[in-house]
Image (cartoon, rainbow, N blue to C red):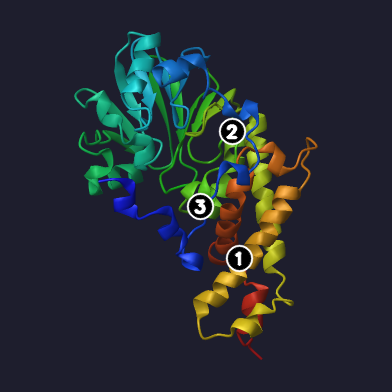
Amino acid sequence: MNDHAKFGTPTDRHHLGAAGMPLNTLSDYRPIPADAYGTLFLPDRLAKGYHVEEINDGAFYVTSGAYDAMFVATGNGVVAIDAPPLLGVNMLRAIREVTDEPVTHLIYSHYHSDHIGAAGIFGGDGLTVVSHEYTREMIERWPDLGGTRGLPTPTHTFSTSETLDVNGVKFQLDYKGVNHTPGNIFIYTPKQKALAAIDIISPGWSAFKHCDASENIRGWAEAHDWILEYDFKAVVSGHVNRWGTREDAQASRDYTADIIAFAKEALDQAEDLEFIERIGFSNAWVLWENYFNEMTNYVTKKTLEKVTDNGQTWGQRLAGADVMTKYHAYTILEALRLEYGLVTAFEKRIIPQEA
């Protein structure tokens, strides 16, 4: 069956009009800066499908060019952190490329399948599997998260913080509260100064849509500050194609803070929204869509045009910011109502206030 038979022609899909989503092309957006591609076009990644490099003292970064993970060779066993399906068996190949130590420990950052769904490659017998207790609950509840291979069930869980010692190599595991997901933890190796903080920042890039599809936006925003509490040389973030620096983490935090500030500014204004009278109240969703679209466009314009501390705008500084900022803006606008307790000027205008 060809694509047209399954999905219809592109023209068919475009005829959805306002009910559908636009289909754009590369020419609609800014070119990606060459330094944002990181490992993507390195000869070894192109040849093997992955790239592996040492961060420091046995801590390694491995990437498919879109998803990444971390592992640490302790001298008598490897500790793997996550196993994204888009790396799959290439993660095992990367480990074998640099050490003949067996994989003895596996740490799950969180339960999302796009980061741990290939963990079945490590087997299960004799493997120590560590996670937050919420992650174990999700894996036991939904065993298909690992596809046909299944996922090794955590053998050890914790609720707040724990120190794991593997052959004298220390791993500091911290859960600071709900962020990208409940149970999303920070994995830090003090000696190597390597930090795995997954699905918070994307070094050199804007995060993926809707604050990286996060389940709690206020917690996700706060997690940028949590990252900067660690003394790290490298932060492995899960995306996109290089590990991050402190400067990357600070830039992502400032970009997020600007979106929040402009969103608050937008929601405090609703005096000149002519569409309220024009559309009326018969279709509430059309009314709210127009409102959020107006506010989203306001926040997106303000954010992309802001000149940052290095003299560039966010649109110039972060790859893909012109693609993704509108999604972050919408999501943060909604979070301000739901998670920050902000009553918008729009609501005050259309809802009778108490005498």
Q: Residue at x 60, y 37 (%)?
A: 205
Pair 2/1: label in front = 1
Label 1: element kind? helix
Crowd band around label 1 with a 10 angstrom C-alpha radius: few (<14), some (14–19), many (20+): some
Q: Quadrant of residue 101?
A: top left
Label 3: element kind? loop
Residue under circle 2?
203
Amino acid bearing label 3? Leu
Whether residues under marks 2 and 1 lie with C-beta atoms below 8 angstroms apart, the answer is no
Residue under circle 3?
23
What whole-number distance in Å separates the C-alpha atoms at marks 3 and 1? Answer: 18 Å
Amino acid bearing label 2? Pro
Q: Quadrant of residue 337?
A: bottom right
Q: Residue furthest bottom?
A: 355
Mark linked to residue 30: none
- 134 vs 355, left or right, is left
- Say which quadrant the C terminus sits in: bottom right
Residue 177 spot, x, y in % from top left: 48, 47
| 81 over 191 or under it: above or below | below
Q: Residue at x 37, y 32 (%)?
A: 84
Mark linked to residue 293: 1
Nearest to N terminus: mark 3 or mark 2 = 3
